[in-house]
Image (cartoon, helix red, strand yellow):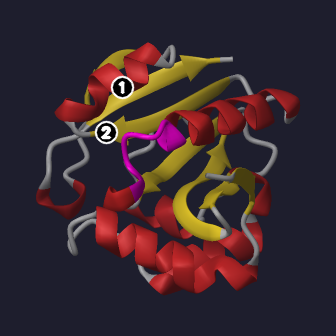
Amino acid sequence: MSLNIRRATMDDLTACTHVETTCFEPSEAASETSIKTRIDNFPQGFYVAELDGRVVGQVNSGCTAKDDITDEEFKQLIGHDPDGRNMVVFSLSVLPEAQGLGLAKALMECFIKASRTMGKEQILLLCKDYHIGFYEKLGYEKAGLSSSNHGGFQWWEMIFRL
């Protein structure tokens, strides 16, 4: 098993869309257009995990100076500020057949390191309640219930202080 974590490129668009739509409910998954926008406009915040040369996971993001990350338009990078002090994770996902191998943790560790290198202050994200423990093990703090109901679900705000 050979693992490689690297920045996404446009060549990864189809694979990243497949990972996104496989791992999320249709009402919450980002569209191919959104994923293309994220790769195009902020590749510094978009990483893929390749297992034996195949993309099986991803983490992608945007930046903002704001602490409120519930704006749905921001997921399209509307209001994205590459100089913003906060990295905002839009999606962390690993295909079901590759789960349990530590890939999500490896992706997040790479993402945290890149965020530090960029001089960011915090990483913010929203997650469902059953993912809180995973993020807490990585050093995130639960900030409370979010006002977001993206995809018709309840979300929790998590903060990682860099």
Instruction: Give the SS element for disc 2.
Output: strand
Instruction: Give the SS element for disc 1.
Output: helix
Determine which quarter of the picture holds residue 71: bottom left
The residue lying toward the viewer, choosing from 33 and 46, is 46
Image position, residue 132 (x, y; %)? 29, 25
The residue lying toward the viewer, choosing from 19 and 83, is 19
Residue at the extreme front of the image, as rendered? 1
Determine which quarter of the picture holds residue 65: top right
| Horizontal relation, residue 106 to residue 155: left or right | right
Q: What is the tally of numbered marks visible in this picture?
A: 2
Residue 30 in view of the camera: no
Q: Which residues are magenta?
A: 98-104
Q: Which residue is mark 2?
A: 127
Residue 114 in view of the camera: yes
> Residue at image x 49%, y 84%?
32
Q: Which residue is mark 1?
A: 134
Determine which quarter of the picture holds residue 134: top left
The residue lying toward the viewer, choosing from 109 and 126, is 109
Quarter the C terminus occupies:
top right
Mark 2 vs 1, N-terminal side: 2
Image position, residue 116 (x, y; %)? 79, 26
Label 2 is placed on what type of residue? Cys
Q: Classify mark 2: residues with Cα within 10 Å, few (<14), some (14-19) or many (20+).
A: many
> Residue at image x 75%, y 34%?
115
Label 1 is placed on what type of residue? Phe
Q: Classify mark 1: residues with Cα within 10 Å, few (<14), some (14-19) or many (20+).
A: few
Image position, residue 6 (x, y; %)? 76, 55
Image position, residue 128 (x, y; %)? 23, 39
**Residue 97 to residue 126: above or below:** below
Q: Is-magenta flag for residue 58?
A: no
> Residue at image x 60%, y 42%?
107
> Residue at image x 60%, y 65%?
77
